[in-house]
Amino acid sequence: MRRLQASYRQLPAEAPVRLAKPTSNLFRPRGGPPDGGLDVSGLTDVLAVDPVARTADVQGMCTYERLVSVTLAHGLMPLVVPQLRTITLGGAVSGLGIESTSFRDGLPHESVLELDVLTGAGEVVTARPDGEHADLFAAFPNSYGSLGYATRLRIELAPVAPYVRLTHVRARDLDHLGELIAQVVAYRAYAGRPVDFVDGVAFAPDEVYLCLGRWSEWESRTSDYAGQQVYYRSIRERPDDALGVEDYLWRWDTDWFWCSAAFGAQHPTVRRVWPRRWRRSDVYHRLVGLEHRFGVVARVDRRRGRPPRERVVQDVEVPVERLAHFLRWFDQTVGMRPVWLCPLRLREVPTGNGAGARTWPAYPLEPGRTYVNVGFWGTVPIAPGAADGDVNRAIEDQIAAVGGHKSLYSDAYYDRAVFDTMYGGAVRAEVASRYDPAARLMGLYEKAVQRR
């Protein structure tokens, strides 16, 4: 903590404020010079686990890979574990995260009990749901460092079983898919069996699966998708499956969902010689970064007369009753496949009047409403007469039309007025004026939209 605050004080007043971290899961430019930033090297660990209270005190730059390895030793896990190993807890809270427990437990910030935040004024304050800094606590999720940086978080944990048993259910069509999701979320069960995990994959407009998981104390055989087999392919091939709990939590990381295919890592011959330790999302992310830097593939495409391509890397939240409509529009307009699906609801917590859900102004989902995260990651050719960004703008318009939201880790094109309406601009401005009166930190709009 002392190193962090000292590095903050050493920054010139006009210098951009950013974290000096070796990895990132962002798909938009990071502000500041690549060799500068705040020293977070001492904020990467789990400070304590209380197995009785089922809580953990965790430093902000601790990766989920590290966090999970510590909590599993106590038979516990975070309530929501985002898909990629190198996502940090502070990053998931300030930038959102999601996974297959989100239909029940919401997003990672909803299991935070308190957090220490380095503010734009250079002070560290402890924010909780109530008390002096409750305004910062509520506005911090989806602020992406524009309101400060989490240095320590106390989070709730949940008990685990040794295995996860999977059932892959194919929907008859897109309308049936929405009905299935609504049913499973409402009853937390399917075909008389409890459901502890829900996500899914749309391989084609007429081939969509829900992946339903439940805890299991014993399995005679489990699959290994960090070896030669590829997880997402198994969804089409196996109606039932079983994984150890840690393998389940990182099932998507090994092949970066399906994106490792772009590097040849799913070809059987290449996979046999590709070191197992390099079958990780952060390795593929670095390869993408090299392409962005040097543009080798883009130059080859130009020589071959291929059209330039627009990057379409987005996660969006769609109300479940509009999911079929959105997917049909997406198939006709964008046409990327596969697509990841993950239901979520704001988490219900005990209140004085029973149970209810907190609201979060910078990402205002409706309490009691089921959404489905739709994730799609790739590129599309830029059509003659079109411009780079047109497809992403069309997606933003369609998301607004169906009453949804989109995450801000990638490209965004909103004008400021629309952006502030969608992401709690008035509340964020009020909180920023209190905790960053000199405006040292870059605003959310500047980070998410103007820094393309």
Image (cartoon, rainbow, N blue to C red):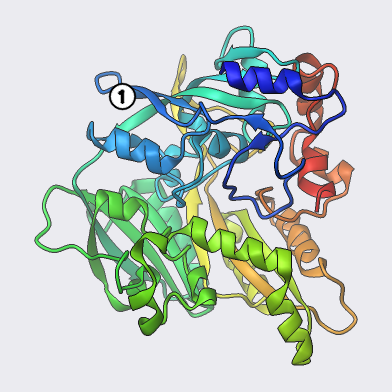
Taking depth in this image into account, of 206 and 395 the one nearest to the observer is: 395
Quadrant housing the C terminus: bottom right
Answer yes or no: is residue 166 visible. yes
Q: Residues within 10 Å of mark 1 (few under 14, many from 20)?
A: some
Decide if residue 402 is on the left or right side of residue 389: left
Residue 413, above or below 236 = above
Residue 412, x across and y down, in percent: 77, 53
When asked about the image quadrant of residue 169, the answer is: bottom left
Residue 81, x across and y down, in percent: 42, 43
Taking depth in this image into account, of 113 and 304 the one nearest to the observer is: 304
Taking depth in this image into account, of 36 and 222 the one nearest to the observer is: 36
Quadrant housing the N terminus: top right
Taking depth in this image into account, of 260 and 105 the one nearest to the observer is: 260
Q: Which residue is mark 1?
A: 54
Decide if residue 66 is on the left or right side of residue 445: left
Tell me which amino acid carries mark 1.
Arg
Residue 214, x across and y down, in percent: 25, 51
Q: Residue at x 47, y 34 (%)?
A: 62
Q: Residue at x 54, y 31 (%)?
A: 41
Residue 23, above or below 395 = above
Q: Of all residues shown, which one is farthest toward the top?
A: 132
